[in-house]
Image (cartoon, grey):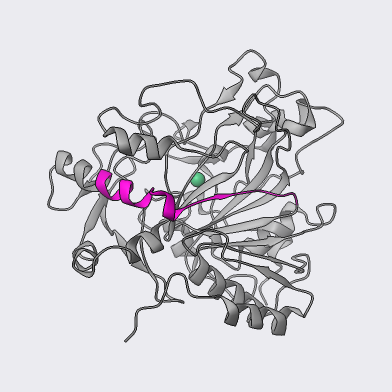
Amino acid sequence: MQEPSVNSSPLHLEHRFATLFGEKVEFEGPLGASGLGVRVSGIDLNIPLRPAQVELLLDTLGRCRLLTIAGQDLDRFSLAAFERFANHWGAPVAHPSNFLRGGKPAQQDGVSDGVIEYRPYADRRAAAADLTLPGQVACLPHESPAVLVATNLLGESERHGPTLKRGGSWHTDIEYEPLPIYVSMFLVHHAPVARDAPNGQWVEPSAESGPAPYFPGSDGELMELRKRLPLNGETAFADTAAAFAALPPEEQAKLETVRVCRRLNKGDEGWLAPLVRTDARSGIKSLHSPVWASRPGIRPPVEVHGMTPDESREFLDRLEKHVLQPQFRYDHVHRPGDVTIWNNYMSLHNSPPIKTRIDRMADARLLYRLSCKGEPSLVLPRNDDPSWIATNVPGGYHSPDSIVGERR
Ligand SMILES: [Fe+2]
């Protein structure tokens, strides 16, 4: 059987979009040189989707790894409508920034375990967004623990901090649970438009040298690839399907046997997860989180089954270096009204350097994120087994009936 191609022309998808959503749909792609990403416009996500339309969106993500559905009417498209849409992709997952584990923030240095308590909106860091440029921008009202607000509207607490937040470390979302998140999505309200840094971009590269936010000890070439990040607030992606496809067949075959031990906290027994996954819809193979320590200081580095910790690092640093090469990279420009969905099993991503302490709208960056686990659902509400939810979704969260409707 012929291997599915990672960069085949998406013409057949374009045709299906026209058939199912109408001739007004415009289709642009691939967005990245590796074949990753398409952008479609002319679809109003306020209108509930028919099963065949959901199927097409799922097929598109399985082939293209990243899908932007552009042009949502931000006066009408609420966070409840966004969460309803997310339910088609999987069960929405509460974000660690929105809950406490054992009485402390769930995503910070050191061990986190214990009972999960959701934080009300007023206690979240995002609440400060409303105080940053009062009268000009505010967060959409919500209490859902699944909604993560990604913003540089940080209120008074940041007034005396640094003016630039450096980029993050390359990762996939929540790879450290036995059932990882496979789909994440952004709804974009504001993206920075200022380009008045001395280099003519939004920000200049960070002047900091040294390995942070990474652990010391990786080679210089890898560090340079890691830190080459976009400067206009784009989200950086690396295509782990194209990177896998570019390897010699013998190496692909070896990688398909590799299991990685992942754990939530240092000292946990952990579990073994495959390094290579096959997309159920497209048959495309990809590397899932081929990174030794994607959350330095927050989650423990992973170990390759059968290798020592040092061997594991060397093996995964080499793979990360392969994946972060320019031909597999794509910097995604955010535009207001975009819903951008990415497949975490088929890509890595990273947050760019971001201007902080802002005092004008031209610098504002305000995105809402949702992430999903498990199987897609063509119809809503989803029909997840409560025991599956209890095992796989922190705090047992599921979208309320007010968002997804009542089960009949
Ligand atoms: Fe992320």
Q: Is residue 138 above or below residue 42?
A: above
The answer to whether residue 295 is visible is: no
Query: At x 70% / y 55%, what residue is drawn?
Result: 338
Tell me the quarter of the image containing the C terminus. bottom right
- As drawn, which residue projects farthest toward the top? 160
Q: Does the magenta-highlighted stretch encompass residue 326?
A: yes
Q: Position of residue 344 (x, y in %)?
A: 46, 57
Please say if 299 is above or below 75.
Answer: above
Side (left or right) of 121 relative to 287: right
Splitting the image into 4 quarters, where does residue 288 fall?
bottom left
In screen coordinates, is 55 left or right of 62? right
Q: Position of residue 57 (x, y in %)?
A: 60, 72
Please report the bounds of the magenta region as a residue range. 317-336
Q: Position of residue 285 (x, y in %)?
A: 36, 69
Instruction: Determine the image quadrant of residue 110.
Output: top left
Residue 397, placed above or below residue 170 = below
Total of numbered circles in the picture? 0
Q: In the rendered view of the protein, which quadrant contains the N terminus?
A: bottom left
Q: Is residue 251 left or right of residue 99?
A: left
Image point (71%, 28%), residue name: 196
In front of the other: 219 or 287:
219
Please state the horizontal and vertical placement of residue 155, each as a whole percent of the image: 70, 23
Q: Nearer the viewer, residue 218 or 176?
A: 218
Q: Residue furthest front?
A: 199
Based on the picture, tell me whether residue 278 belongs to the magenta stretch: no
